[in-house]
Amino acid sequence: MSRLVSYRKQGPVAVLAIENPPVNALSPGVPEGILEGLKQALGDEEVKAVVLIGGGRTFIAGADIHEFEKIHAGEARGLDMILHAITELEQSPKPVIAAIHGTAFGGGLEVAMACHYRVAVASAQVGQPEVKLGIIPGGQGTQRLPRLAGAAKAAGMCAFGEPVKAADALSCGIMDRLIEGDLLAGALAFALEVSDKTPPKASERAVQGDPAVFASLHAEANKRLRGQMAPHAAIDAVEAATRLPFRDGCKVEAQLFENCLKSDQSKGLIHAFFGERTVAKIPGIGKDVLPMPIRQAAVIGAGTMGGGISMVYANAGIPVRMKETTQEALDHGLATIRKNYANSVKRGRFSEEFVNERLRLITPQLSYDGFEQADIIVEAVFENMALKQQVFTELDGIAKPDCVLASNTSTLDIDAIAAATRRPEWVIGHHFFSPANVMRLLEIVRGKQTSRQVIATSMDLARKLRKVGVLVGNCRGFAGNRMFAPYCRESVFLVEEGNAPERVDGALYEFGMAMGPLAVQDLAGLDVGWRIRKEFRHLEKPGVRYAELDTMLCERGHYGQKTGRGFFVYDESRKASSNPEVMALAKEYAAKAGIEQRAASNDEIIERCVYALINEGARLLEEGMALGSVDIDIVYLNGYGFPAWRGGPMKYADLAGLKKVHNKVCEFQRRFPDIWQPAPLLERLAEEGATFSSYDKSRG
Ligand code: 3H9
């Protein structure tokens, strides 16, 4: 018997248990084990029914995603064995019952639907999340699911990949019974009840579909998963089930599955799936470094960031003290928090009760009272080094000895902040992204002296706060903002060269960015960059071109959304329209500065902006400011609206080919020699025909 699937008999029922931790993926050996067990059960006259169950924490979380990576890498692997097991399960003359706990996802649900019955504990979840990997169900799920749950439900599940709870699965026909108490005992009892019945086959059921439903799902997919092909393919595959016999529908599914699997989109999304898990592993910080428990938190500052961060802690159930310097600022901060929560209730994200509980966890105050008990203190004051250092000196005198001291700075030197204390090993950067209660990214900035335990605690805390924590080095702007600067610079340059903001943003929006760079700058406030620029003006090199247009807008009092005018004009509902003043200013400035006005193609806009990100990313990587290119990708996917289906800027470069990227960067260097220089790492990898991913093999 395969070591991944065990076989035993309990009376007249054969129990096949999958033992492939951690999630019982259908790795090579698992379908073979199921087939072997089934054969044994069918050959044993005493066996009247078969129960298929998952050992450990779950049923089957799907096909083994590593196998798709191998297919992408050109290693000939087939998923045929999974399909073979699926067919044999359904053909079994003895009833097979899938007993589900944890998750039956993807291929896991497809295996369960090939069984004749499905029972589950109430906490179980089922789903077809393949679209999140850029593919569609490939184990006949698009054909069986509509036959069990109806075409509309199935198409929605396959197009958006959201899981369905056991009770919902029962009511829509996916599940046959919910088991209270012990799952195996319940499944065995169920097996005895059905052991003398002719096993029903999902593939033999009839299914109908309404074209209007499919059309509206396509429209929804265009909105929710803009630019992605898999959701549409999934809807088409389910639609095929409504007009073709089962076998022909399976052929349609197989073709669509294949198209999706070989697309760059699935390469990007699979990279993102594993990337999110990879960044949590820090080289040199193993299981021997135990994270400290964070039971109480404190935040300094109740502004946009401080208030948002306080909400993040409260949402994770951690009591948090939120300190301001004036009653007015404190009241304002609290009012904003209340308004944000009220919006969440209105949108159905949180219940009123949940919100009231969270609000009770936030203690607004003007003093440092209680800060001595906090396990972590997060500073979120104005972005000014002297002020931050003063706060950290105060904290040094108040915080308990084993309190993590985190700064939410987005640009300043963590070591200089740490130097204001006598315990730099306890100081770390926790760079949240605005709005902190929404954005998933948490850049964790390691100072020269930050201890391994403080890093381990921060990474563990990020997960508990439901953030994606990415460890980065201490350099100006850290990983995300440092790369964002040349990206934004190029977008402003393009406007200065005569390209309208809507054209520049439009090209990048089409590329897949959640927002164009100019709209992002308007949202963040043009004054933020202006202030930082003033602080660092002494570092600017004479004779080098810097983006001026944003400065010119600020000098006219146009800070972006907050003043209703920036690269765009905003109405009361924050709807953007074009700002005619921008093009006039650009023209005037270009004439004065000798900048050539010329229309850029969409490709040029995308390449200048995105390759600027990549080139700076390569520098970061070589300097060791990011542990791997995958860390940079995860930063960009979760903090900067980079399209997940492109995998992140570094993966995008790998897929485009580093030679191509390098050649373009060299071309830009010829055109703008004072601005563009190819990063040495990009140059080297391009020359070697290598990729950033291959460089990551020695991540850290
Ligand atoms: C599919 O089924 C296609 C079929 O239609 C085709 C049939 C022919 N494979 O997330 P966690 C690893 S496509 C390989 O931290 P959690 C994961 O990388 C598949 N590995 O745990 C991690 O490894 P490490 C459709 C997998 O409790 C470890 O398991 N299915 C797979 O927070 C723990 O994972 C999906 O898309 C896998 N399928 O969440 C489900 N799944 O420790 C994807 C997980 O080395 N998985 N790993 O970093 C999930 O959504 C979550 O992992 C799950 C558990 C909810 C199951």
Image (cartoon, rainbow, N blue to C red):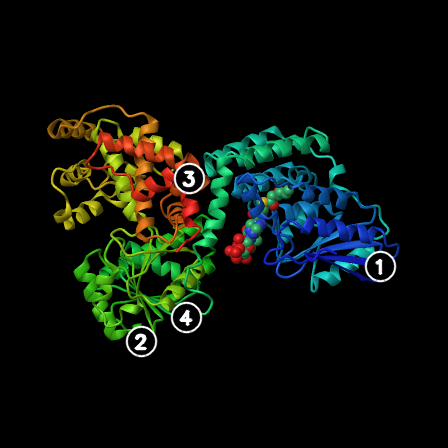
What distance separates the C-alpha of mark 2 from that of mark 3?
46 Å
Q: Nearer the viewer, residue 227 or 481?
A: 481
Residue drawn at the location 18% of the way across and 38% of the way down: 546
| Mark positioned earlier in the residue sequence (1 or 3) | 1
Looking at the picture, how far across and down is residue 174, in whole percent?
Answer: 68, 46
Single out the residue that lies furthest toward the right. Answer: 45
- Alpha-carbon distance for marks 3 and 4? 38 Å
- Report which residue position mark 4 lands on: 292
Looking at the image, is mark 2 or mark 3 nearer the viewer? Answer: 3
Compare marks 2 and 3 and give the one earlier in the sequence: 2
- Res. 627 image quadrant: bottom left
- Residue type beneath disc 3: Asp
The disc, 3 or 4, on the residue closer to the chain's N-terminal end is 4
The tag on residue 12 is 1
Residue 447 placed where, x, y %? 29, 62
Residue 86 lies, with reference to residue 509, above or below; the image says below
- Separation of disc 1 and disc 3 at Cα? 55 Å
Along the polypeptide, which appears first: circle 1 or circle 4? 1
The answer to whether the residue bearing label 1 lies less than 8 angstroms from the nearest atom of ligand 1 is: no
Q: Which residue is mark 3?
A: 654
Q: Secondary structure at mark 3?
A: helix
Mark 2 or mark 1: name the one nearer the start of the chain: 1
Residue at the spot of label 2: 401
Is 127 on the left-hand or right-hand side of 662? right
Q: Which is in the foreground here, disc 3 or disc 4?
A: 3
Measured as percent of width and height from the top left, residue 206 is found at: 73, 35
Q: Quadrant of residue 192?
A: bottom right
Report helix, strand or loop for mark 2.
Answer: loop
Crowdedness near tag 2: few (<14), some (14–19) or many (≥20) residues, C-alpha within 10 Å? few
Q: CA distance from mark 2 to mark 1?
A: 63 Å
